[in-house]
Amino acid sequence: MLIEFVKCLFSLQIYAVSITICIVLGLKLLALIWQFDFPPFMVLIIAILNDGTINAISKDTVKPSPHPESWKLAEIFTTGIILGGYLAMVTVIFFRAAYKTNFFPVRR
């Protein structure tokens, strides 16, 4: 049972690292490139609510390992940083596509 719990925490930690990188880096790039005004408190609220929702809806079907598991921090952070960087890049690309389109009318 404990081994299953550690494996479940492993995937949740990768998610937490990647979504934190995504939120912070993505919004920082939006603020630097397009002078997007986003208060730091809102970034904190998004991060907390996002972690709360993933913990509430997560159901991990891990299989127990025959040997004891250990924390692989290098793997957690490497995977999280790569996924978070990718998510931040996609966020910036999507914002640029939505920003340059004429689909959303500008009201003055």
Image: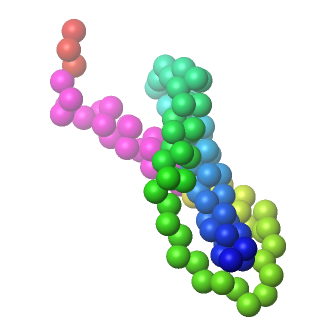
* Res 26 visible: no
Kindly identify the residue that appears in the image at 37 percent across and 43 percent down: 94
Residue 77 spot, x, y in % from top left: 72, 58
> 88 left or right of 11?
left
* Residue placed most toward the observer, 34 or 62: 62
Q: How many marks?
A: 0
Question: Where does the C terminus fall, quadrant-wise?
Answer: top left
Q: Quadrant of residue 107?
A: top left
Residue 61 spot, x, y in % from top left: 53, 76
Kindly identify the residue that appears in the image at 67 percent across and 70 percent down: 5
* Residue placed most toward the observer, 43 or 101: 43
> 104 left or right of 73?
left
- The vertical placement of 46 against 63, above or below, is above
- The vertical placement of 106 against 101, above or below, is above
In the rendered image, residue 75 lying in the magenta stretch gets the answer no
* Residue placed most toward the observer, 103 or 24: 24
Q: Quadrant of residue 4?
A: bottom right
* Res 99 visible: yes
Q: Which region of the structure is painted magenta?
A: 86-105
